[in-house]
Amino acid sequence: MFKGLGGLGDMAKMMKAAKDMQTRMAALQEQLTQIIVQGESGAGLVRAEATAKGELTSLKIDPAIFKADDKEVVEDLILAAIKDVQKRAAERTQAEMAKLAEEMGLPADMNLPI
């Protein structure tokens, strides 16, 4: 007579797990704004820092590269450093997401929405 009620318990577990995941994802989102990654180009002549969310927070340029006739080289180095830090930020985000997935008993390669 009450056969269907067993399914309600499973549904409640699923809802609790979904709520837990939502809470943990929100916490991870906040963590990603605090994690700083570094990128560089030109053997360290240009260094960039960003949050793991990809927000550029710092750009440092060695004064040795400032020569008027090297303007294009400097621009290329700056762009390369920014691209490097963005790539590292994305990699760090994926690593943190995989860690969270594993902690929740999900496959590490599961694509969790960010």
Image (spheres, helix red, strand yellow):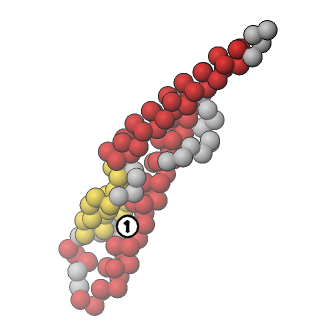
Q: Residue at the top extreme?
A: 1
Question: Which x, y percent locates residue 113?
Answer: 54, 46
Judge left or right: residue 75 versus residue 13: left
Amino acid under disc 1: Ala
Kindly identify the residue that appears in the image at 71 percent across and 19 percent down: 7
Question: Which x, y percent locates residue 11?
Answer: 64, 23
Q: Residue at the left extreme?
A: 63
Question: Which x, y percent locates residue 17?
Answer: 56, 26
Judge left or right: residue 38 versus residue 20: left
Question: Which x, y percent locates residue 31?
Answer: 36, 41
Q: Which residue is tagged 1?
A: 81
Q: Residue at the front extreme?
A: 1
Kindly identify the residue that appears in the image at 54 percent across and 39 percent down: 98
Location of residue 28 with respect to 79 vertically, above or below: above
Q: Is residue 35 visible?
A: no
| Dot 1 crowding, Cα within 10 Å, few <14, some 14–19, many 20+ | many
Residue closer to the observer: 76 or 2: 2
Q: Secondary structure at mark 1?
A: helix
Kindly identify the residue that appears in the image at 35 percent across and 52 percent down: 51
Count numbered badges in the picture: 1
Locate residue 110: give its quadrant: top right
Residue closer to the observer: 113 or 78: 113
> Which quadrant is home to the N terminus?
top right
Q: Is residue 114 visible?
A: yes
Location of residue 76 with respect to 47 vertically, above or below: below
Judge left or right: residue 6 versus residue 43: right
Judge left or right: residue 65 versus residue 33: left
